[in-house]
Image (cartoon, helix red, strand yellow):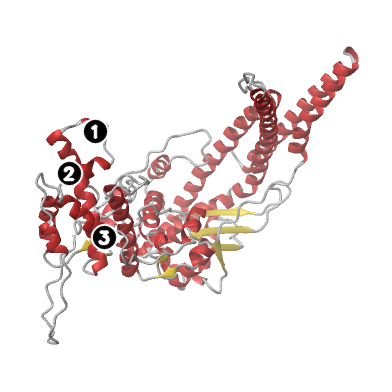
Amino acid sequence: MGPTLRAARALVLLAGFYLLGLVLLAALAAADWAAAVHTPGAFALKVFLVSAVLALPIVRGMFMLRTPPQEDVPGVRVDESREPRLWQTVRDVAQQVGTRAPDEIVLTGDVNAAVSEDSRLLGLVGGTRRLRIGLPLMTGLSESGLRAVLAHEMGHYGNADTRLAAVSERGRVHVLRTIAHFEERADAKVSKERARQEKKAASAVAKGRKAKEVDTTGTGITYRAMARLYTAYGKFYLRATLSGSRRAEFAADVAAARIAGRDATSSALREIPVIDAAHDFYLNCYATLGVDAGLLPPPGEFLGGFRHLLAARHEELDALRGELPTEPVSPYDSHPPIAERVARIEALPDDGRASDPVRPSLSLLADADRSFAAVEETVLTPAALGLRRLDWPELVHAAMSVQTERSAQRFGALALGTAGGEDTSPHGTDGGGGTPGHGADAHGTPGHGADADGTPGHGADARPGADADADRTSRPEAAPEGDGAGAGTLGALLDAIDAGALWRIAERLPRSAEAAAAHGRAAREFARPQLRAGLSQLVSAEYLRQGRARWQLSWAESAALELPYGHVDELPAALEAAVADRPDTGPLRALLEPVAAPETSVPAQAPAPGPTA
């Protein structure tokens, strides 16, 4: 379907919205006329009032012509003097597609590339063209892959998709706005009726009578009936316009294959969901790792650190590249499933142009580090920008130390009976009854639902600059020092174990139904892993407090707690002894005994480095 036919269809669908409004207004007018002619004056007046109230949302939807402006995506606008190679590449691709190049290029902080156009007169007259390119997307794509993405976006310009989108968008906005007006009025009427009945019921109770149950069934039904009419048309409108959007994506893919080559386009389409999954993982497990501790990576590294992850986890990412995501198909999707798009491109004849992934697309930027820092300033909230900045190794140690301390505090409070049970499961340092230093690998695999417990980024929101982040970042905290859940809690727990209270402590911990029903040795076997895991958290916190352990950064796997030399071998047995049927805390106490400072000034030979799990 050519641009002319698509424009005609969009205008017809938009006209249908106005036609529906006129038909409904005519029906209300006919009801008013019939009431005036055939009914008494009082009833006719009521019909007039109802018609006027119902007509108001219809008229508002029809004549509030101004479409709300699109939400501005945070980013940095770059001109040709700042990024000459990027601009030249975009212009070259636009020329090959046969369309006018964009007037603006904006670098953003998301895994996306998009084009827009400020068209006028319902898309009949073009306007300022704007290209948005996400730096994380550029981080993961090769230069040939980026050219394929740019050719796809320029294909939207060449097919007039951005201009015609104004007509379709206006219709969608008007339909949804009208439905919202009716729903708001219905909800307001229900609330008013509920308040009236509740007041009446309270008065009855005050007089000693039985109050009637509040029932708002049928209230606002006229408004909701009108909303259902517009909802039905809205569904039809969305199906029709979004099917056109999906066809436009296929057409833009073909343009990309023609300009950049079949293999480069297919490779880029396969790469985008991998980059997206890896970037979500990076934000959760690295970039926002220190937010709860009031910390962020160095300027530019909040976005730029993604490069380290991609370089270190290439084997995991290679596995993801062979598994195209399976997506549920809906008639309301604006884009076709990525697997279908790849299949269509790979079904094209071989053009003899192999994909060349050698040169990264970030090489098109004059100064990638400067660009990362500039875009970071726009995507983070003011509260986040005010956090303390640390290099990655120090950030991981400080942030994981805070998480270890909090996890230890929760378990210590539960075990000693001083908790309100806010977080009832010990987790964090050790993923399931493990040993500090053996790393609780949450199985940080991008794109495979990595659990954050024990992985850098526990509980972190993946949205840079989101409100939730702003709430958390408004209270910076340093790495834990002092008592906390330290020697006092751990010492009290070990004393209680020595006093024979181990299994009474186990009863305070949350249990499954099966564990709660168990007795004797079976109950002890259910409780033992949980006791061991919680005790290991307290031990980890104590090692950190003494300065004898350190969390080690790894881009290839989860952070690991490095223990003093030899302890990684001795600690498992010490923990097992502390939670045995006949508990013995002696080995554990011996390991946790602080090392005395040397009395002589002769430097001792440095011990071999402690193993890192």
Depicted 440 relative to depicted 551: above or below: above
Q: Are marks 2 and 1 in contact (CB under 8 Å)?
A: no
Depicted 279 relative to depicted 63: above or below: below
- Relative image position of residue 556 (x, y in whole percent): 26, 59
How far is the residue under mark 1 from the one under mark 3?
29 Å
Q: Are marks 1 and 3 in contact (CB under 8 Å)?
A: no
Looking at the image, is mark 1 or mark 3 nearer the viewer? 3
Q: Quadrant of residue 437?
A: bottom left
- Residue located 48% across and 60% down the image: 109
In the rendered image, which residue does mark 1 sit on?
516
- Relative image position of residue 320 (x, y in whole percent): 31, 48
Q: Is residue 367 left or right of residue 507?
A: right
Q: Nearer the viewer, residue 129 or 135?
A: 135
Q: Residues within 10 Å of mark 1 (few under 14, many from 20)?
A: few
Looking at the image, is mark 2 or mark 3 nearer the viewer? 3
* Earlier residue among tags 1 and 3: 3
* Earlier residue among tags 2 and 3: 3
Q: Secondary structure at mark 1?
A: helix
Under mark 3, the amino acid is Gly
Q: Is residue 189 left or right of residue 71?
A: right
Depicted 30 relative to depicted 516: above or below: above
Position of the C terminus by quadrant = bottom left
Q: Nearer the viewer, residue 413 or 152?
A: 413
Depicted 243 relative to depicted 144: above or below: above
Label drawn at residue 333: none
Q: Nearer the viewer, residue 439 or 36?
A: 439
In the rendered image, which residue does mark 3 sit on?
488
In the rendered image, which residue does mark 2 sit on?
528
